[in-house]
Amino acid sequence: MEDCLDACEANANCESFTWAPMDGDQNHPGTSVCTLYDEAEPLNTWGPRQIMCQPLECPAGSDQIGELNADIEGCGLLECDDRYQDDYATMQDCLDACVAHDDCVSFTWAPMNGDQNHPGHTVCTLYDSVTPNRQWAPNQIMCGLA
């Protein structure tokens, strides 16, 4: 999947990509499949095992910490159920929440379907540390306040 992300980031027109592991694309058995798109919104579903991702960049006022999918285990400074799109629809909302929280020095942002445990949700997690201790996939970014 990293090669697919790299291909998308190298293409100025790429807004998103889909990646399917070996045998994960119903039309291409026996191979993994990477497809680049000039749109960010999915138009349908495809299977049996495929994911749509968007390249992530920390918003102005923050800097990326570690590699893509860097993470600190746990729910951070918020209750676990308080981290979803009802409160944080965008990465900017997540940054703003971190800036407003006295103890927050970093955050992770996973766009819709970017957190492996929370499909169908965006996830914003605020932290009082800038030291990741694991990787969490398939598509999230860790940002520290600049």
Image (tube, rainbow, N blue to C red):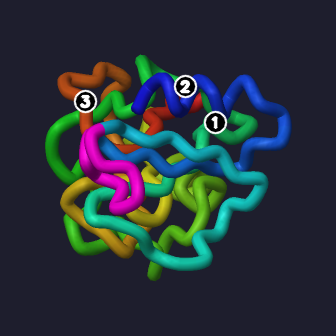
The residue carrying pointer 2 sits among few (fewer than 14), some (14 to 19) or many (20 or more) residues within 10 Å by Cα, namely many
Dominant SS type (magenta): loop
Using residue 30 as the reference point, say whether residue 66 is left or right of it. Answer: right
Q: Name the residue beneath numbered marker 2.
A: 64
Q: Residue furthest right?
A: 12
Task: Name the mark nearer the viewer: 1 or 2.
Answer: 1
Question: x%, y% of residue 36?
Answer: 65, 45
Question: x%, y% of residue 75?
Answer: 21, 53
Alpha carbons under labels 1 and 3: distance apart: 17 Å
Compared to residue 45, the image places residue 104 above or below, namely: above
Determine which of the numbered discs, if any, sits on residue 57 in the image. 1
Q: Which residues are magenta?
A: 22-30
Determine which of the numbered discs, if any, sits on residue 90 in the image. none
**Placement of the C terminus among the 4 image quadrants:** top right
Compared to residue 106, the image places residue 75 above or below, namely: below
Q: Amino acid at mark 1?
A: Glu
Residues at discs 1 and 2 in contact (Cβ within 8 Å): yes
Alpha carbons under labels 3 and 2: distance apart: 14 Å
**Placement of the N terminus among the 4 image quadrants:** top left
